[in-house]
Amino acid sequence: MKKIISILAAAIALQIGGCATTTKDSVSGVHRSQFMLLPSDSVDKMSAQAYTQTIKEAEGKKTLNVDKAMLERVRKISNRLIAQVGVFRPDAAKWAWEVNVEKNDQLNAYCMPGGKIMVFSGLIEKLNTTDDELAAVIGHEISHALREHGRERMSQAYVQEFGLQALAAFVGGSAGSAVAQGAGLGSQLFFALPNGREQEREADKMGLELAARAGYNPDAAVTLWQKMSANNKGAPPEFLSTHPASENRITDLKALAPKVRPLYEAAKAKQS
Ligand SMILES: [Zn+2]
């Protein structure tokens, strides 16, 4: 039975080209093969809808892009990072990227599938974040999107919830209507399912390389984590509860920094 299921799963994966890695190999060495079952365009569509909804709600509460200087700063840093995404996957350079800032005390930021970025003002104000540190956070979040971790999590949740049979039907042609029904589901899944440890490691590594390529100091990823941890007195900040910190993470970032440093130095030389 197990064998039949695995054959079926493999067949479905092949049919929609699901079993592959979403990004090209690079200095940071992220190349885990991913089992993706939901179609990428459906996930992106659901995410875009959820993002639009979030923007509308923030506008209603007058918390969207309140501080124009802060918005400009976040967009400038994000755009420099986005200019480098083609290294990892050329198609992402053509995504409909959006960058906004929400007035919110939480230490958090996210990038939804398809390139919809939101940075919370608390992350900047409470930690007095430098440009390099901000690039480390946004680079990390962009990397989740490049690796399509959201789609991966949704695919896993879909199989767990409805089983492979439902999945076969989904892939077999009724994908459109199923996605329409699942529009709300998509955003719920995105925010409710935490990234796994391996996904976080990948986002850390790729984010570090992305920031270096954009001319941001890779050491900033470490100081950012230290600031986050120092701020972690009393209730843990949102970012840490969705991104469990550990000494390992800092150790990994420190180990990778020398490898991406030449990329950083080359980018700096080009800028000056
Ligand atoms: Zn993360």
Image: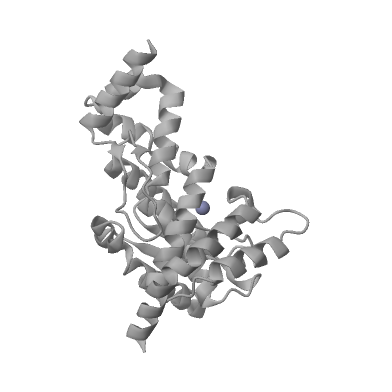
Q: Is residue 173 left or right of residue 167?
A: left
Quadrant where the N terminus is found in the figure: top left
Answer above or below: position of 47 versus 76. above
How many badges with numbers are in the image? Answer: 0
Q: Indicate the quadrant where residue 153 lies.
A: top left
Camera-nearest residue between 149 and 88: 88
Q: Residue at x 48, y 69 (%)?
A: 258
In the rendering, at what x and y percent does residue 127 appear?
64, 70
Which quadrant of the figure contains the C terminus?
Answer: bottom left
Name the spot of residue 72 as percent of width and height, x first: 44, 77
Q: Could you tell whether 269 is left or right of 191 in the image?
A: left
Query: In the figure, 103 relative to 143: above or below?
Result: below
Q: Is residue 203 left or right of residue 33?
A: right
- Nearest the viewer among 191 and 208 is 208
Residue at the location (52% across, 42% down)? 196
Please identify the quarter of the rendering in which residue 125 is found: bottom right
